[in-house]
Image: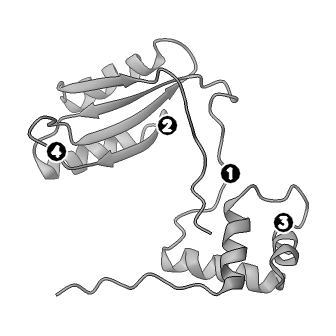
């Protein structure tokens, strides 16, 4: 029997708040008051909604998104790793996720034609940086079965908009 909590429902005002908070925050000393004014509510309502969702785990974190290419991190690679044992994949994934060069780390299902289950997105400033990280991870974890998927061109990259 599953005790999964139902997804929250939001009023129209809450949806406006979340849409505004999910976009670029106003560049002002009072961004939450600015969101409130645009959403037609009070700053206290904005803060209560965001704080409540953070406390419930609906919002994992609230922070800036760095445009890595504009910040000098113009090299990246998605690396697919094969770690057959699920417990070992958890352990290795946590080690990978602790690396500052890795922005994303996921465990995904495998398929008969694709046995890789652990994925990392590695970022570097210079050519070769990503390969150095791959080699260091492989050496530290003992995982030697992996595929490096180099980006050829970025077609789209935006933050998800829910409302």
Rendered position, 71 above or below 86 = above
| Residue denoted by label 4 | 110
Residue 97 locus on image (x, y percent)? 39, 44
Secondary structure beneath dot 1 equals loop
Query: How far is the residue under mark 2 from the one under mark 1?
Result: 16 Å
Measure how far apart labels 2 and 3 are at the Cα level.
Answer: 29 Å
Q: Left of 148 or right of it: where is 146?
A: left
Position of residue 51 in the picture relative to residue 115 (left or right): right
CA–CA distance between discs 1 and 3? 13 Å
**Between discs 2 and 3, the one toward the N terminus:** 3
Q: Crowdedness of circle 1 by 10 Å Cα count: few (<14), some, many (20+)? A: few
Q: Which of marks 4 and 2 is in front?
A: 4
Residue at which label 2 appears? 100
The answer to whether residue 84 is left or right of residue 148 is left
> Which residue is disc 3 drawn over?
31
Q: In this view, does 148 lie above or below 111?
A: above
Residue found 83% across the figure and 85% down from its top: 42
> Which residue is rendered at x = 80% and y = 77% of the image?
39
Nearer the N terminus, badge 4 or badge 2?
2
Q: How far apart are marks 4 and 2 (CA)?
A: 26 Å
Give the spatial CA distance, label 1 vs label 4: 33 Å
């Amino acid at each position: 029997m599953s005790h999964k909590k139902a997804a929250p429902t939001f009023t129209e005002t809450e949806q406006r708040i979340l849409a505004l908070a999910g976009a670029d925050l106003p560049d002002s000393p009072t961004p939450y008051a600015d969101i409130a004014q645009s959403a037609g509510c009070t700053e206290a309502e904005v803060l209560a909604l965001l704080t409540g969702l953070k406390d419930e785990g609906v919002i994992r974190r609230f922070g800036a998104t760095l445009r890595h290419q504009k910040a000098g991190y113009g090299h990246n690679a998605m690396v697919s790793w094969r770690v057959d044992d699920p417990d070992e994949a958890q352990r290795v994934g946590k080690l990978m996720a602790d690396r500052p060069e890795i922005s994303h780390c996921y465990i995904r299902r495998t398929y008969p034609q694709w046995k890789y289950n652990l994925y990392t997105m590695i970022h570097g400033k210079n050519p070769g940086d990503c390969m150095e990280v791959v080699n260091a991870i492989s050496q530290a974890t003992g995982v030697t079965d992996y595929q490096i998927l180099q980006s050829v061109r970025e077609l789209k990259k935006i933050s998800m908009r829910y409302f």
